[in-house]
């Protein structure tokens, strides 16, 4: 039973395109994240949830990649690292597979749950289609 569960987890992880990055410092903004993770064509969604006032990050970010290979490379590089603009005592990032996978399901979920918070640019997700910001 445990072996089956481990196999299913490994299989879903290897096919994942959407990752949740934990331990993002509260002072981070979407602009700082884009400095760390520039638009290089490997991802099409970057979302940094903010507290209700839109001034502080809640501590995690979501990023959807164009392929499972890009996601795996990102996870391999960033898991356990600290962000450049965090203090040296900042917590190390923990990268996990997100519950919702894919661009369209994530955009749909964000539009349904958070549309009123998207008035502020800092609260909006970064969405890229055909190499252009949407």
Image (cartoon, rainbow, N blue to C red):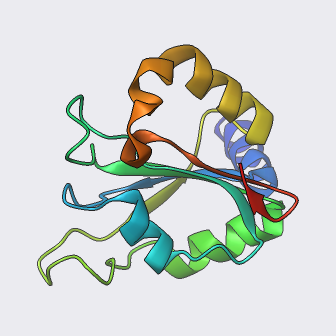
In the image, farthest residue toward the right: 130
Say if 60 sits above or below 68 in the image. above
Q: Position of residue 14 (x, y in %)?
A: 77, 57
- Quarter of the image containing the N terminus? top right
Q: Which residue is drawn at 41% across and 66% down?
A: 31
Q: Position of residue 19 (x, y in %)?
A: 59, 52
In the image, farthest residue toward the top: 112
Tally of marks: 0
Q: Which residue is drawn at 43% across and 19% down?
A: 116
Determine if residue 102 is in view: no
Say if 112 sits above or below 45 in the image. above
Q: In this view, does 5 lie to the left or right of 130?
A: left
Q: Is residue 88 left or right of residue 49?
A: left
Q: Where is residue 21 in the image (x, y as percent from the top left)?
A: 45, 56
Q: In this view, does 49 lie to the left or right of 11?
A: left
User: Looking at the image, which is closer to me, 22 or 109?
Assistant: 109
User: Looking at the image, which is closer to me, 65 or 79?
Assistant: 65
Q: In which quarter of the image is residue 35?
A: bottom left
Determine if residue 29 is in view: yes
Q: Which residue is drawn at 20% across and 47% down?
A: 56
Q: Which residue is drawn at 41% across and 59% down?
A: 30
Say if 14 sits above or below 110 in the image. below
């Amino acid at each position: 039973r445990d072996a089956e569960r481990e196999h299913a987890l490994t299989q879903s992880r290897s096919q994942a395109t959407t990752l949740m990055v934990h331990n993002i410092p509260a002072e981070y903004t979407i602009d700082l994240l884009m400095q760390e993770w520039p638009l290089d064509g490997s991802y099409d969604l970057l979302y940094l949830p903010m507290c209700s006032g839109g001034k502080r990050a809640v501590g995690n970010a979501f990023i959807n990649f164009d392929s499972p290979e890009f996601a795996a490379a990102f996870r391999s590089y960033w898991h356990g690292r600290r962000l450049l603009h965090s203090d040296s005592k900042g917590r190390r990032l923990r990268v996990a597979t997100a519950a919702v996978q894919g661009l369209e399901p994530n955009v749909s979920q964000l539009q349904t749950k958070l549309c009123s918070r998207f008035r502020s640019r800092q609260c909006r997700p970064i969405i890229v289609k055909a190499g252009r910001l949407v």
